Image (spheres, rainbow, N blue to C red):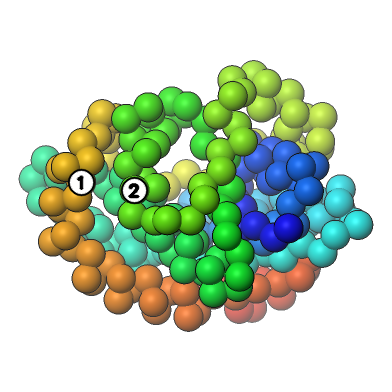
């Protein structure tokens, strides 16, 4: 059963992907490349982690898909005014799910899996988790919601991901100083109506430019095709 697993290069998403595999899913690992807002080394980490996941699961074919997300982030930053800037993380995540849904459905896939942990990030609070998936209809699975951070770290070490996950890289440079942690669906929807047209146009461009790699893959092959 195929699924799309979001992978960031941090500790949580590889663990979520491995849990999905153990439950019988065959994942496409979808990474959002935030150029030019990404941290140096992020793409290298993602490739190494994806290859390690594939090495642990040689009985199935795993694909790494890299989709640009920088234009989306730039549009969000340019569209939000005043205190709306606190909603940046929410709209970034909403668009991640929107693009992942379009990508998945085009391939006959009916689910998305993420490594979200309750309270781990501003977009992962009890208020915000339902908001970030409010604009999609696809099944969004969050296998780590029942785990605390210590349990996830323990699994990461057990499965051989931890040493790569803690390397530098992976931080987003567009996070607001005071991100919204108690989002309002009504407020988000009102802003979304104003900015969605341009975001959807950008989403179509970024989905068209996606790059897919059968794992394992050499880093040089990825870097030849993905702008860094």
The image position of residue 36, as x and y in percent, is 41, 63
Query: In what quadrant of the picture does the N terminus appear?
Result: bottom right
Q: Which residue is mark 1?
A: 188
The image position of residue 82, as x and y in percent, is 8, 45
* Label 2–label 1 contact, CB within 8 A: yes
Look at discs 2 and 1 and give the one toward the viewer: 2
Q: Which residue is mark 2?
A: 134
Query: Can you say whether 33 is above or below 14 in the image?
Result: below
Query: Can you say whether 60 is above or below 227 in the image?
Result: above
Q: CA distance from mark 2 to mark 1?
A: 10 Å
Residue at point 66%, 27% (across, down)? 152
The image position of residue 106, as x and y in percent, is 54, 74
Residue 157 placement, left or right of 143: right
Within-10-Å neighbours for mark 2: few <14, some 14–19, many 20+: some
Within-10-Å neighbours for mark 1: few <14, some 14–19, many 20+: some
Can residue 89 be seen? no
**Quadrant in the picture for residue 10:** top right
Front residue of 54/39: it is 54
Can residue 181 be seen? yes
**Quadrant in the picture for residue 195:** bottom left
Looking at the image, is mark 2 or mark 1 earlier in the sequence? 2
**In terms of secondary structure, where does tag 1 sit?**
helix
The residue sitting at the right extreme is 59
Front residue of 93/48: it is 93
Front residue of 1/38: it is 1
Residue at point 72%, 65% (across, down)? 63
Residue at point 61%, 42% (across, down)? 13
Residue at point 26%, 29% (across, down)? 182
**In terms of secondary structure, where does tag 2 sit?**
loop
Residue 108 placement, left or right of 140: right
């Amino acid at each position: 059963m195929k699924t799309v697993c979001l992978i960031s290069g941090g500790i949580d998403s590889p663990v979520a992907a491995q849990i999905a595999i153990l439950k019988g899913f065959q994942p496409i690992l979808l990474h959002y490349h935030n150029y030019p807002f990404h941290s140096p080394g992020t793409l290298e980490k993602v490739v190494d982690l994806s290859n390690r996941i594939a090495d642990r699961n040689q009985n199935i074919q795993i694909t790494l898909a890299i989709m640009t997300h920088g234009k989306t982030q730039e549009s969000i930053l340019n569209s939000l005014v005043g205190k709306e800037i606190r909603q940046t993380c929410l709209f970034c995540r909403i668009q991640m799910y929107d693009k992942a849904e379009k990508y998945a459905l085009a391939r006959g896939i009916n689910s998305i899996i993420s490594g979200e942990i309750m309270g781990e990030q501003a977009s992962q609070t009890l208020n915000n988790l339902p908001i970030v998936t409010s604009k999609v209809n696809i099944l969004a699975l969050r296998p780590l919601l029942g785990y605390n951070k210590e349990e996830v770290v323990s699994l990461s070490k057990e499965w051989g991901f931890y040493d790569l996950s803690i390397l530098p890289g992976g931080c987003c440079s567009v996070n607001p100083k005071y991100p919204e942690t108690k989002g309002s669906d009504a407020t988000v929807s009102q802003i979304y109506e104003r900015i969605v047209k341009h975001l959807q146009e950008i989403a179509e461009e970024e989905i068209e430019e996606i790059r897919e790699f059968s794992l394992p893959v050499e880093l040089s092959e990825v870097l030849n095709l993905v702008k860094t």
